[in-house]
Image (cartoon, rainbow, N blue to C red):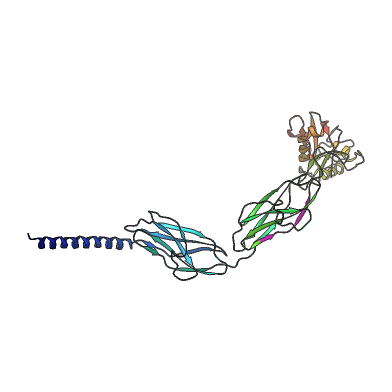
Amino acid sequence: MCPTKIFASIAILVVFISIISCNKVADEQKGSSKIEISGTIIDTIKASYVIVNSSVILGKYGTITDHGFCWGISISPDLSGSHKSLGGFQTGGSFSSKLTGLLPSTKYYIRSYIQNSYNIIFGIQNEFTTLDNLLPEVSTAEITNITENSAQCGGNVTNDGNGMVSARGICWNTTGNPSLTNYLNKTQDGIGIGGYISQITGLIKATTYYLAAYATNEKGTTYGNELSFMTQSFSIGDSYGGGIIFYIDNTGLHGLIAATTTQSKEWGCAGTSIPGTSTNIGAGQTNTTAIVNGCSTAGIAARICYDLVLNGYNDWFLPSKDELNQMYMQKITIGGFANGTYWSSSDYGAFYAWSQFFNDGTQVNYDKSHTAYVRAIRAF
């Protein structure tokens, strides 16, 4: 065969191979068009962010090298502007993202996208307008568990102001109008809306403090209602008010005092039910008055407490079931208790009343006609 014919045959073969190759690429690119992406759905709109989602159906040649969202203030946003890459995947399905750093009160255009080895496919364009950025709303919770150097409070962020609440907590001072100007006198208790609890520490005994809840978003910081409280000037075991302090309530300013002497008496009026008594802390004084009015027997447990004048105080009473238990828990601090049964002022029907063994703390119903120990208390 002559050289001319050989070269001609080679040229034809090259062209043929090129055609096959081009057709294969064209087929693959055509196959990639079987990949489908939905438009963008806007789930949440705020002043500085949105939450969006989209979905992909994979066809032939469906390996995805990248996917995500692109957005901007001009139509047809693409990857040359703001975009969020979520990386590649090999299976179809939905995907979502939180897009941050947006301007308030601004109209944006957004498209989801996917990218494979051949091209970028965009979803149908959507649009949204961010909200106006406002200050958050927060209220201050009740102050509880006050001690000599600590207290518990909290707050509730009820509105995020269309933004992201990045800080919330309690701030305090001793002069009023507390704010974040003193970075030491504050707590940081999470982010976002909802209620929270704050532990306030490092306080000074017997000092008045002012506090308020706060919440911060992109717009700034807002404060809840101002509250005040005084740290405890009392401690369990203090000699005060004619006896020994054995209980302090959540305000830190009030509690119960135990007498320093013990007597032994029957509860009295067995067979008679005293209506209206309670087992709760704070009920002892009312219980005692009800017993004295409902049982005329002299020298019973409630009456000797009711008539007691000790260290200049005449408002003693027989403790309720729960008050008696508080006294048992502090029996070593108070001192002078016997390992026997002590009466409470909480009635348990016609023949029984609540009592407590001070050897192991067990509380039982005890026959009213039996003799048991009596330790009077008073409130402050």
> In the rendered image, which quarter is residue 111 located in?
bottom left
- Could you tell me which quadrant the N terminus lies in? bottom left
Q: Of residues 332 and 190, which is closer to you in this image?
A: 190
Image mark count: 0
Expressed as whole percent of the image width and height from the top left, the position of residue 107 reads 52, 70
Tell me what residue is drawn at x 35 percent, y 61 percent: 35
Reply above or below: 45 against 65: below
Rendering coords of residue 147 (x, y %) = 76, 44
Q: Residue at x 40, y 54 (%)?
A: 89
**Where, by quadrant of the figure, is residue 80 drawn?**
bottom left
The x and y percentages for residue 173 are 76, 53
* Position in image of residue 20 (x %, y %): 22, 61
Q: Quadrant of the C terminus?
A: top right
Answer with left or right where residue 306 lies relative to residue 72.
Answer: right
What segment is highlighted magenta in the picture? 221-232
Check the image and report above or below for 249 versus 135.
Answer: above
Question: Magenta span has 229?
Answer: yes
User: What is the quadrant of residue 102 in the picture?
Assistant: bottom right
Q: Is any atom of residue 348 visible in this view?
A: no
Residue 118 forms part of the magenta stretch: no
Q: Give the side of residue 329 with respect to residue 1, left or right.
A: right
Q: Residue furthest front?
A: 3
- Left or right, 375 with respect to 149, comes to right
The reply to whether residue 281 is visible in this rendering is yes
